[in-house]
Image (tube, rainbow, N blue to C red):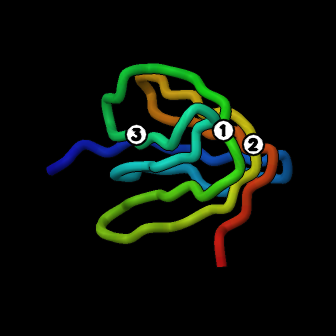
Amino acid sequence: MAQKLHFSLVSPERELFSGPVDQVDAPGAEGDFGVLANHAPFMTALKEGQLRVHNNGQVTVYDIRGGFADVTPEGLTVLAEHAVEAA
């Protein structure tokens, strides 16, 4: 069984998601990137765009505006200036 990535998506209003996922694709300020379990640690600014959460063959999309992504050995945390689940 593939290892899961712990992912948290937080906006100023509330935490939109927290839990294990397969992959997250995000709009980085210096280019889009994807994160899987055991990714090398890094931190980057985010630009406006869509954040895609892949889990068990399904994709959930969030529209985000700005913020930061922090990849640590524990997982990925996205602190977004604004985030809503896409319609």
> Which label's residue is closer to the chain start, 3 or 1?
3
Picture disc at residue 66? 2
Secondary structure of the residue carrying numbered label 3: strand
Secondary structure of residue under mark 2: strand
Which residue is labeled 1 in the image?
46
Task: State the mark number for residue 35.
Answer: 3
Instruction: Name the residue located 71 percent from the left edge and 50 percent from the top edge.
Output: 48
Q: Are marks 3 and 1 in contact (CB under 8 Å)?
A: no
Tell me how far mark 3 sits from mark 1, CA to CA: 14 Å
Disc 1 residue type (three-letter): Leu
Q: Is residue 27 left or right of residue 71?
A: right
| Cα gap from disc 2 to disc 3, whole angstroms | 18 Å
Residue pushed farthest front?
A: 30
Report the residue at 14% width, 50% height from top. 1
Residue 28 image offset from top left, x and y in percent: 58, 38
User: From the image, which quarter does the C terminus lie in?
Assistant: bottom right
Residue at x 70%, y 54% (from the top left corner): 64
Q: Please name whichever residue, 82 or 28, is drawn nearer the observer in this view of the structure.
A: 28
Tell me the kind of residue under disc 3.
Answer: Val
Q: Position of residue 77 (x, y in %)?
A: 58, 36
Position of residue 11 in the picture relative to residue 59 (left or right): right
Q: Position of residue 36 (x, y in %)?
A: 34, 40
Please tell me whether mark 1 sits on a helix, a strand or a loop. loop
Q: Residues within 10 Å of mark 3 (few under 14, many from 20)?
A: some
> What's the residue type where badge 2 is placed?
Gly
Is label 2 or label 3 in front? Answer: 2
